[in-house]
Amino acid sequence: MNLTYIYQNPFSMKRILVPTDFSFSADKACEYGFEIAAGLGAEMVLMHAFQQEYRHPDMPADSYDMVHDDAAKKMETIRDAAKADPRYADVKVTIAPFFGSTRDMIDEAVEQYNPMLIIMGTEGATNLQKRLFGTNTQNVVHDFKIPVLAVPKDAEVANFRNFILAADYFPGEDKAIEFIRDFSRDLKAHLTIMHVGDVPEDLSVSESAEGMRLHRIIGEEVKHDFQFVENDDVTDGIEEYLDHRHDAGLLIMISHDRSDWLERILIPRHTNKVLDRMKIPTLIVDDEF
């Protein structure tokens, strides 16, 4: 089955997918799921993948239904608890239990529900790499190129409306910037466009042009500003900036090539510096989604 997915007009189908394994990290992702769904006026698809790896002959024939119903009840409890909050009372929630492995069932859920965004909890970069990218190149992030929001367990929703776009000023397609613009606009967020480099005067002509392109696309629809961080190491620069931005609620990164991005960002020497110590969510937007 060809899983490659061509993503078009994401904000015309406001639906977000939140996989859960009922862990604390997944519960944190659900918090952000409800916050974003309420802000966007989106439907939230809450999914859980379950499987019976071994079935004893003495197990009842309806054991599948029992596991299925148990998963559904747990998700209904999450839904009901969140919707008791007046802020989330109007959020439409679809409960979606799937039988199979988590990665395969995320593929199924993406095909079935066509979400604009996937939100997943993570306890750190090592776990993020394992859960989102795995060891198989045919995985949900690579195949579908859907924006993914990775939520660390210590994240707090309170500052979520302050977004930081770590821009490398690499020329690319407009769609990723348009998604970030619309996402920021609909959530009424302020967007800071941060670039890490040696010195501001050393910006090349192409980098300066890319900064102007970002400003043109974002326009007046979103309150935004530009910040330059002087550092010869991108990951150190991001961490340094975020250390001084205590009001930051979301880090946004654009992936121009998922394999290159994986090598540059998710290798061990970087994870300890950025994602593994990150206390705020990270939104990964593919340049070609």
Image: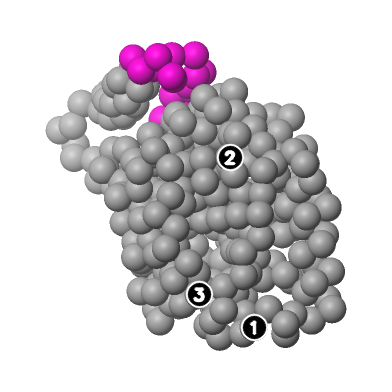
Nearest to N terminus: mark 2 or mark 3: 2
Q: Amino acid at mark 2?
A: Ala
Label 2 belongs to which residue?
189
Label 3 belongs to which residue?
237
Q: CA distance from mark 2 to mark 3?
A: 23 Å
Q: Is residue 232 visible?
A: yes
Q: Amino acid at mark 3?
A: Gly
Nearest to N terminus: mark 1 or mark 2: 2
From the viewer's side, name the closer residue of 191 and 172.
191
Above or below residue 266? Residue 179 is: above
Secondary structure under the numbered disc 1 in the rendered image: loop
Query: What number is the disc on residue 184?
Result: none
Label 1 belongs to which residue?
199
Q: Amino acid at mark 1?
A: Val
Q: Is residue 111 visible?
A: no
Above or below residue 280? Residue 50 is: above
From the viewer's side, name the closer residue of 209 and 110.
209
Above or below residue 231? Residue 6 is: above
- Residue at (84, 69) in percent of width and height: 209
Q: Residues within 10 Å of mark 1 (few under 14, many from 20)?
A: few
Above or below residue 285? Residue 59 is: above
Q: Residues within 10 Å of mark 2 (few under 14, many from 20)?
A: many
Q: CA distance from mark 1 to mark 3?
A: 12 Å
Location of residue 108 by image quarter: top right
**Magenta-highlighted residues:** 83-99
Q: CA distance from mark 1 to mark 2?
A: 28 Å
Q: Residue furthest left?
A: 58
